[in-house]
Every structure is written in C-alpha cells, then in structure tokens.
Image (cartoon, grey):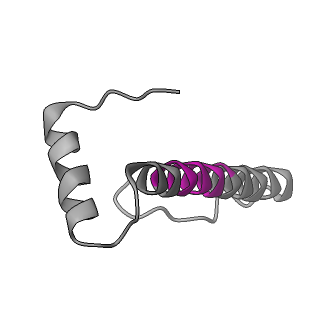
Amino acid sequence: MEVTLPPDLKRQVEQELASGGYHSCEELIEHAVRRFLNLRQRGERRLEALRRVGMAVDRARLYDRVLIPGT
C-alpha cells in the first residue's frame, strides 16, 4: 500500500522521524493508524454505554427527575 500525504503532514512526519522517535515512516504510520482505530473503538464503546444508560433511564421513567445543566 502506498500513502500520499499532503505537504504539511509530510513535513511533520519528516520532523518526527528526525527527532528519533520512530525508526521508519512505516513504523510511525502504523502507530498512528493503530491509535486512530483504538480511539474510534473506545468512542464507539462509550457511545454504546451512554445508549444503555439512556435506555435504563427511559425504562425506569427517571427522565422527569434528571436535570440537565443548561436546558
């Protein structure tokens, strides 16, 4: 797979490589993609947990007693 980055990202990747934090561009990109996927998965789990909380509040009919700041 080949990846073409816009010039600004390419410069940042080159700076990161020059700093010695990564041994290769591939290593940096792999780390970035894994982090992105992990964060997205974590966000999906949090959203699902919030949905379950909302459903539990609905089932218990607690929504009349829940105060939401700013509303």
Residue 1 in the magenta stretch? The answer is no
Q: How many marks?
A: 0
Q: Is residue 66 left or right of residue 19?
A: right
Where is 62 relative to 30, above or below?
Answer: below
29 or 39: which is nearer to us? Answer: 29
User: What residue is shown at x 21% (from left), y 65% (from top)?
Assistant: 18
Residue 39 in the magenta stretch? The answer is yes
**Residue reaching furthest to the right:** 59
| Residue 37 position in % (x across, y down) | 59, 48
69 or 50: which is nearer to us? Answer: 50
* Span shown in magenta: 32-44
Q: Is residue 2 left or right of residue 39?
A: left
| Residue 67 position in % (x across, y down) | 52, 65
17 or 69: which is nearer to us? Answer: 17
Q: Is residue 8 left or right of residue 62?
A: left
User: What residue is shown at x 26% (from left), y 51% (from top)?
Assistant: 13
60 or 11: which is nearer to us? Answer: 11
| Residue 60 position in % (x across, y down) | 84, 59
User: What residue is shown at x 48% (from left), y 56% (from top)?
Assistant: 27
Where is 70 relative to 21, above or below?
Answer: above
**Residue reaching furthest to the front:** 23
Quadrant placement of the C terminus: bottom left
User: What residue is shown at x 70% (from left), y 55% (from top)?
Assistant: 45
Decide whether the magenta segment is chiefly helix, strand or loop: helix
| Residue 50 position in % (x across, y down) | 67, 56
**Residue reaching furthest to the bottom:** 20
